[in-house]
Amino acid sequence: MALCGGWTLFPLPFCSFVCIFLKTLRSSSYTSFPRRYSIYRTSRNILGPEVQTFLEENTEVTNSGNLTPEIQLRLLTPRCRFWWERADLWPYGDPYWAIYWPGGQALSRYLLDNPDIVRGRSLLDLGSGCGATAIAAKMSGALRILANDIDPIAGVATLLNCKLNKLDPLPILTENILDSELDKWELIVLGDMFYDEDLSDRLLQWLRKSIWTHGTKVLIGDPGRPQFCGHNIWNHLQKVVTYSLPELTKEGNNSLTTSTVWNLQL
Ligand SMILES: C[S@@+](CC[C@H](N)C(=O)[O-])C[C@H]1O[C@@H](n2cnc3c(N)ncnc32)[C@H](O)[C@@H]1O
């Protein structure tokens, strides 16, 4: 996959991780786990207490350098060993969840500033990563939330982040929801999910079904990645709000300076 300038997020060697993430994700053979909304189990037995300990030891709790200082998150920062360590020493799958991506930041900021959008509603955070946007939705009063990410470690990170923010554990689903029966959601949010053409095609098709079947409102956060702007979805978006990215996020995202929330209208 050709990486756009704005995708390079880390100094080497961690930035090499990002390239690997994207390749891995495209050819991903993640196991489909039985539907579960809060309990963790995988066939590879990687989600024991040692995963939690590993995450706690190899991330830093931070609320700075992003658009939502209200939310504490465990992230990979330059003060963490694996920011500098060789990527192949990382013992788990690609840690997308250790980054708070600009698209997710914009969505979370928007939900925190506009609680009426989610209060009392059901919300699916598709590709939830560290769980920040699902947490923002909870803080804004969403009634039913599901954080969905195909990476089970992202689920553990989300639970740790809930605890950091003194929230009850959010329901988590780590199966590929795009292969599942369509549930009814009033709102679906997707932060930085349109970075790969095949995935974007699948997402658009799935979102289209959800909008047509259930009248779901779909909000997408994206900092203007070429893969997003060049996709067919671009013809179906209505701009909601644009945020300037904080310096630290800008530094990690090369040419990207803003992140926008879009309403998908089909
Ligand atoms: C670039 S990260 C964005 C994370 C988060 N939304 C944010 O903005 O910080 C993309 C995330 O999508 C997840 N992902 C990729 N394909 C997925 C799929 N089909 N279903 C659910 N999650 C997926 C990855 O594991 C990763 O955590």
Image: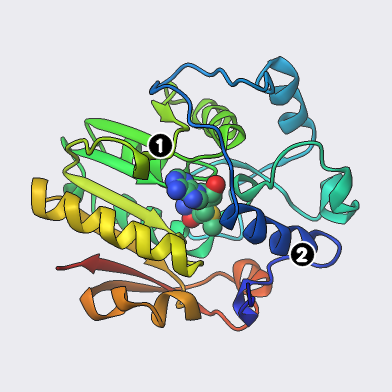
Q: Nearer the viewer, residue 27 or 132?
A: 27
Q: Which residue is mark 1?
A: 147
Ligand 1: does it lie within 8 Å of the C-beta at label 1?
A: no
Residue at 56% x, 69% y: name it: 246
In the image, residue 9 lies at what x, y percent?
Answer: 68, 67
Image: 57 above or below 244: above
Spatial CA distance of label 1 from label 2 is 26 Å
In the image, residue 129 lies at what x, y percent?
Answer: 52, 45
Q: Is residue 257 visible?
A: yes
In the displayed structure image, the side of residue 217 where residue 200 appears, left or right? right
Residue 262 is labelled as none
Q: Quadrant of the N terminus?
A: bottom right
Residue at 81% x, 36% y: name it: 91
In the image, residue 106 lies at what x, y percent?
Answer: 41, 62
Q: Which residue is mark 2?
A: 15
In the displayed structure image, the side of residue 4 where residue 177 appears, left or right? left
Q: Nearer the viewer, residue 212 or 90?
A: 212
Residue at 22% x, 39% y: name it: 182
Image: 13 above or below 255: above
Q: Quadrant of the C terminus?
A: bottom left
Residue at 88% x, 55% y: name it: 84
Image: 146 above or below 14: above
Mark 2 lies on a secondary structure that is helix
Find residue 231 and report its image quarter: bottom left
Q: Name the residue type under label 1.
A: Ala
Mark 1, Cα crowd under 10 Å, few <14 / some 14-19 / many 20+, is many
